[in-house]
Image: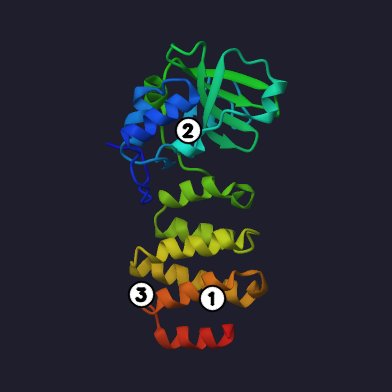
Amino acid sequence: MTIWVRNGNNAATEQEISAKETELGLFLPAEYKELLLKQNGGLIRKNHFPTNEPTSYGLDVAEIYYLASLNELLTDIPEQNDVDLAGKQVYFHRDESRYIGFSYADNKSLPSIIYVDFETLQTLVVAENMAEFLEALYFSPFPVDFAEQFPVKKLDQILASSNVKKTKQLLELLEDYPDKKWYLETLIRLLQKNKIPYNIVVYQSFENQLLYFRRKLVPELVEKIFAMLKDCDGIDQSATTELYKEWE
């Protein structure tokens, strides 16, 4: 069973993977390539992995939200000059100053998986290889009490595994989230499900955005949501018409 959250990304091709390996001068782990052949990067369903010492995430745990596509792999990290790392690193995940990636002792060896926090200058080998790392991943719900402080990819990961009730709770907590573009794009993704409970949650959240944050909203996205609402089940079209008059 794949760990991907489906996002519509095309799968990478063998040729694209080979070209990337040539560019890097390294062979990517077989398990990572197998995942890319199903979907070229995106959110994953499992969101934690164990560590053998405390991290800024917890006493014995660290977080992960996505796996990088081929074009998102990172090799040149300015902060890396502050940490003495042997060999070469290719990072497939970033959360602010914290990175997870492949660490190559030499160009021919299979990489271990490392976690690096460039703010605290902490470096951990969290798995001897990619297979071991994937096996150790597990899902545990994120508490949403401090959701406003979360990066958007963490929020996306939470929403991907949320039911209607939790989605409603999260959208309400994030009503004044500063990234209004992300907020409206999230409403659009939920409307694409065209399921009545989600449609109603979206409508309520959208209405509040128009009433309280109108000047901060992206007009093109607002218009797109209005257009989508016309075809959504369970939506009071007369109320939508009145709401659009307020927007105009």
- Mark 1 highlights which residue? 207
Q: Position of residue 196 (x, y in %)?
A: 34, 70
Identify the amino acid type marked 3: Cys
> Which secondary structure lies at badge 2?
strand
| Residue at x 45% of width, y 65% of height | 188
- Nearer-the-camera pick, 104 or 167: 104
- Mark 2 highlights which residue? 48
Q: Position of residue 83 (x, y in %)?
A: 68, 19
Counting residues from the start of the chain, the first of labels 1 and 2 encountered is 2
Q: Which circle marks residue 161 in the picture?
A: none
- Left-right relation of 3 to 100: left
Local packing at callout 2 (Cα closer than 10 Å; few below 14, some 14-19, many 20+) is some
- Against 181, residue 27 (above or below) is above
Q: Which circle marks residue 232 in the picture?
A: 3
- Nearer-the-camera pick, 176 or 245: 245
| Residue at x 61% of width, y 70% of height | 217
CA separation in Å, label 1 and label 2: 35 Å
- Left-right relation of 239 to 76: left
Local packing at callout 3 (Cα closer than 10 Å; few below 14, some 14-19, many 20+) is some
Q: Position of residue 186 (x, y in %)?
A: 49, 60
Identify the amino acid type marked 1: Glu
Counting residues from the start of the chain, the first of labels 3 and 2 encountered is 2
- Against 66, residue 115 (above or below) is above
> Which secondary structure lies at badge 3?
loop
Identify the amino acid type marked 2: His
Q: Are marks 3 and 2 in contact (CB under 8 Å)?
A: no
